[in-house]
Image (spheres, helix red, strand yellow):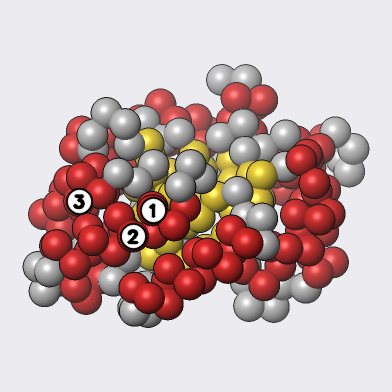
Amino acid sequence: MDKKIIFEKVDHTLLTQTATWEDIKQICDDAIAYQVASVCIPPSYVKRAKEYVQDKMAVCTVIGFPNGYNTTAVKVFETKDAIANRADEIDMVINIGLLKDKQYTLIEDEIRELKAACGNLILKVIIETCLLTEEEKIKMCEIVTNAGADFIKTSTGFSTSGATFEDVALFAKHVGKNIRIKAAGGISSFDDAEKFIGLGADRLGTSRIVKLAKNQEGSGY
């Protein structure tokens, strides 16, 4: 697979607690150079990053991150604040405890509220697959589909593991036809990226693919 196709599906991600503005600027520069899908960064940097990249790159941020147990009102506020700061895409984390309690309507209603806040902007729903049973993963495919989100996403990258081939294949089997798939966390090679795409992933949440390309090709592109 042409690397350009892979780059076009990458959300170039930096969400570590120690990320500085210089770090954010660097991933923005790399994202523009490699023409990835977006940069995925902490909410506190969204406004400054969008001013920096202008229309050269989409800016994505995270809501209820990384644990997902904020109230819906807080998540809605976070979403509206991010959009006011010119975020182009929103990645939200579900309340996993509610899923374990089988409070499916509450989860679906929350996703609907955030999608309403997003309007035409992309909403991705992080379900943290490493903490779920197969039954719960399948149920979340149904809920995300019914709620009208744009993507279902495997992982935050802050839990016990990231995306697996098995989970992406499971998503592809059970999500509705209008729901796209984002594999995130632990994607460290072009071969892995290509396999995730082949299994149905339309986005890849990673910083390693661009770093790998830079190491292979030198500092220039």
User: Relative to 34, is 80 on the left or the right?
Assistant: left
Please say if the residues under marks 2 and 1 sit with CB atoms less than 8 Å apart.
Answer: yes
Q: Which amino acid does label 1 sit on?
A: Ala
Residue at the far right: name it. Answer: 220
Q: In this view, does 63 lie above or below 134?
A: below
Q: How far apart are marks 2 and 1 (CA)?
A: 5 Å
Q: Where is residue 214 in the image (x, y as percent from the top left)?
A: 79, 42
User: Relative to 67, is 84 on the left or the right?
Assistant: right
User: Relative to 176, is 75 on the left or the right?
Assistant: right
Q: Quadrant of residue 171?
A: top left
* Residue at x-position 62% and y-position 20%: 2
**Of 19 and 104, the residue lying toward us:** 104
Q: Is residue 25 above or below residue 210?
A: below
Disc 2 marks which residue? 113
* Residue at x-position 23% and y-position 38%: 175
Disc 1 marks which residue? 116
Asked if residue 189 shows in the view, the reply is: yes
Sequence-wise, which precedes: disc 3 or disc 1?
1
Disc 3 marks which residue? 143
**Of 26 and 215, the residue lying toward us:** 26
Element at label 3: helix
Q: Position of residue 136 (x, y in %)?
A: 15, 58
Asked if residue 162 shows in the view, the reply is: no
Q: Which amino acid does label 3 sit on?
A: Ile
The quarter in which the N terminus is drawn is top right
Element at label 1: helix
